[in-house]
Image (spheres, rainbow, N blue to C red):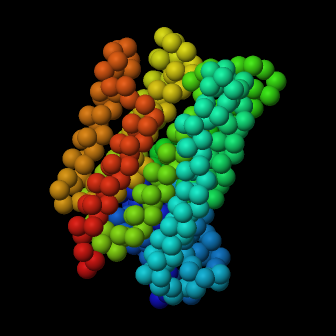
Amino acid sequence: MTRTHVILDGLQDPALAQALSAAWARAGLSNSVDPAGQCAELRHDHMTQSEIDRSAAIARAFGIELRDRAGQAFVADNDLALLREQTAKEYRARLAQALVYLLPAVVLHYVGPYLAEGGGREPSAMLYPWLFEALLVGWACFVGAWPILWQGVAAARHLRATGDLLASVIILLSYLPSVWGTLSLLWQDHAWFGTAGPMCHATAYTVLIALTQRYALHRHTDGLAGRGAMLLRGHARLVGTWLLVMALLFIGVSMTTSIATGWFVSLTFGMLLPPLVSLGAVNRITPGWSSVLPIFAFAVVFVMGKVGQVDITQVRVEVAAGFGLLMTGVMVWGWRGWRTS
């Protein structure tokens, strides 16, 4: 019997893993799925390219794109260690390429007003700084976050609430309206988001956090393998609830203040939940749902302050991004605690 290993990049929900395994079994593919190890094993007599393509099509219905080869050609009896090494190298390269464009974009976001006429107090004077920022961030999304965006779109298409869907929603809803508002300055004096400016820096921070987490994860999957019981069962419901709260915040704040403010608040709240939050639960110190208690606490305080119009936190995109990077450090610290068996 042929054993073909595949990488399940971004799979975090044990229930989703069981459903994927059952779907493969119904298709006649004996298999085992390890969500914590981000991999699966497909067992079939004389595995062919068409059969692996059929397996990949089934996986796309769960918002997952399979990685099954280290070279250009499909090899039925492949090497899992080599696949993991290749995936880690890929995300290291994507993170490095994204940083080349994200760092200048973030710097331009903060120094742009000083370069513009009148200190950037008029949106029309910020056209070119904002436009260059959008171009840099857009290219970083393409070269760095494309696999995440691709899987996020697949998850949305099949109504699967995944971490990639959350990251993709934040990236697209912060970037596309920013680009539209910036381009509108070509034919009018004011952008729809006013003097507050675009949210391309939120896109940049989200891409940075998502890629950093992905690279760190694939460096430690050997130690995480077989620990799927520690993942957040019901992770899809958590992501779905988070997206719903984002929508409610946008509607509520927009009705009391402005659409731009609702946009800022909604995206900032979304950034409080790290894309790989379920895999962050695999650690010895705060296993399972206890690992997300700081996130819930921060989110509750944030919502109380914004909805109640009580300015107690001054939570901005930068604070949400800093919190996400801090949680990433905690995740990596927890992952490093496991030794490869």
- The image shows residue 132, relative to residue 73, as above or below, that is above
Name the residue at 48% across, 63% down: 9
Q: Foreground: 110 or 51?
A: 110
Q: Is residue 185 above or below residue 309?
A: below
Residue 308 position in % (x across, y down): 35, 14
- Can you give x and y, in whole percent of width and height, for residue 47 in the image? 57, 83
Residue 52 against residue 137 in the figure, above or below: below
**Residue 152 seen in render:** no
Q: Is residue 249 left or right of residue 107?
A: left
- Image location of residue 307, percent across then percent down: 38, 17
In the picture, measured across the screen, residue 241 lies left or right of residue 98, that is left
Name of the residue lying farthest toward the top: 256
Of residues 331 and 136, the one drawn nearer to the viewer in this rendering: 136
Instruction: Identify which residue is drawn at 52% across, 61% down.
Output: 95
Of 56 and 212, which appears nearest the observer?
A: 212
246 to 136, vertically: above or below: above
Determine the residue positioned at 51% across, 27% down. Answer: 264
Residue 190, quarter of picture: top right
Hey, which quadrant is residue 144 in on the image?
Answer: bottom right
* Quarter of the rendering occupied by the C terminus: bottom left
Which percent across, then down, holds residue 109? 58, 38
Q: Is residue 220 left or right of residue 293?
A: right
Q: Residue most toward the right? A: 187
